[in-house]
């Protein structure tokens, strides 16, 4: 059974903090390609059971990086000037790097993205479990373990898969 209750997931994240730190260390010692293959399989199964529009927690809690091309595309779609877009929606660091300037995201309404077809790459890819290199993203994955039902359930299934070798 897939857990989607954010209160339960958040509470279990606290309870399992030490266990997860140990599991993260265990995963670092495993064959990266084998871990990726298992994560891909688990993600495909679990993602199909989670309706992100019933959750929207990522859009309510994450700071999203924005590339210039993405900002330009969305600014054009919204029909606003570049200056207006940057003032209203993003914050620019001294390096030129941009992030959405508010949490929750400006574009979230009733757990749905109002600019879905024009959303940023960080939004498109989250929770990143379909991407290779899972072992290189353990810090971020476990940071979001208590926030995302997909990550939570994939990690819990991953623990079960490896239970005989832990």
Image: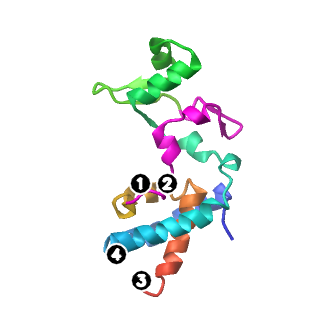
Decide: marks 2, 1 in contact (CB < 8 A)?
A: yes
User: What secondary structure is found at the residue carrying circle 4?
Assistant: loop
Magenta span has 125? yes
Report the residue marked by disc 4: 30
Residue 35 picture location, percent across and down: 41, 71
Residue 95 picture location, percent across and down: 28, 27
Farthest residue to the left: give it: 95
Task: Single out the mark in the foreground, 4 or 3.
Answer: 4
| Quadrant location of the C terminus in the rendered image | bottom left
Q: Earlier in the sequence, mark 4 or mark 3?
A: 4
Q: Earlier in the sequence, mark 2 or mark 4?
A: 4
| 49 in relation to 112, above or below | below
| Front residue (pair 77, 137) | 77
User: What secondary structure is found at the residue carrying circle 3?
Assistant: loop
Task: Single out the mark in the foreground, 4 or 1.
Answer: 4
Q: Earlier in the sequence, mark 1 or mark 3?
A: 1
From where the camera sits, is residue 134 visible? Answer: yes
Report the residue marked by disc 1: 140
User: What secondary structure is found at the residue carrying circle 2?
Assistant: loop
Give the overall secondary structure of the magenta segment. loop
Range of the magenta residues?
103-132
Residue 163 picture location, percent across and down: 48, 83
Mark sitting on residue 166: 3
């Amino acid at each position: 059974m897939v857990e989607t209750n954010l209160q339960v997931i958040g509470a279990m994240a606290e309870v399992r903090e030490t266990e997860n730190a140990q599991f993260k260390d265990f995963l670092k010692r495993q064959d990266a390609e084998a871990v990726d293959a298992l994560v891909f399989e688990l993600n495909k199964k679990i993602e199909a059971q989670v309706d992100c529009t019933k959750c929207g927690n990522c859009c309510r809690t994450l700071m999203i990086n924005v590339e210039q091309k993405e900002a330009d595309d969305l600014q054009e779609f919204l029909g606003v000037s570049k200056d207006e877009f940057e003032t209203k929606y993003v914050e620019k660091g001294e390096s030129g790097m941009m992030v959405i300037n508010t949490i929750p995201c400006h574009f979230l309404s009733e757990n749905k993205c109002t600019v879905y077809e024009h959303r940023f790459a960080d939004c498109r890819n989250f929770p990143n479990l379909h991407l290779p290199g899972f072992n290189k993203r353990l810090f971020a994955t476990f940071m979001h373990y208590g926030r995302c039902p997909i990550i939570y359930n994939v990690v819990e299934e991953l623990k079960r898969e490896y239970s005989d070798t832990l």
